[in-house]
Image: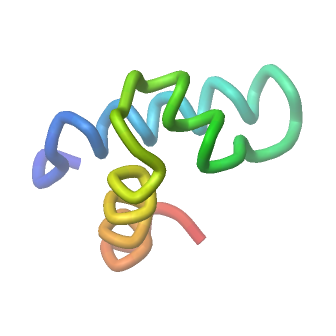
Amino acid sequence: MSDLNEKQSKIISFIQDYYNEFGISPTVREIQNGCNITSTSVVDYNLKALKNKGLVK
């Protein structure tokens, strides 16, 4: 996962931690708040990049 930027790494870690704790995936807003990202569009952009890399569905 060395080709991930800082936000993408934070998002992946947050999703894994959230899923391990609650058994479900977080919402975009929960990812935004949990990763201190400024807007949901930034989260969406990075989720699409992670999907294109095959790291999220």
Which color scheme did the rendering employ for the protein?
rainbow
Horizontal relation, residue 35 to residue 31: left or right = left
Residue at 31 percent of width and 72 percent of height? 53
Q: Position of residue 25 (x, y in %)?
A: 75, 46
Q: Quadrant of residue 12?
A: top left
> Among all residues in the image, which is located at the extreme right?
23
Residue at 70 percent of width and 47 percent of height? 27
Up the image or down, 17 lies above or below 42; here it is above
For the C terminus, give its image quadrant: bottom right
Residue at 50 percent of width and 36 percent of height? 32
> Among all residues in the image, which is located at the extreme front?
39
Q: Position of residue 52 (x, y in %)?
A: 35, 79
Q: Position of residue 45 (x, y in %)?
A: 34, 65
Horizontal relation, residue 42 to residue 4: left or right = right
Up the image or down, 49 lies above or below 31; here it is below
Up the image or down, 17 lies above or below 27; here it is above
Camera-side residue of 24 and 39: 39
Horizontal relation, residue 51 to residue 17: left or right = left
> Among all residues in the image, which is located at the extreme bottom?
52
Q: Quadrant of residue 11?
A: top left
The tally of labels here is: 0
Q: Position of residue 33 (x, y in %)?
A: 54, 26
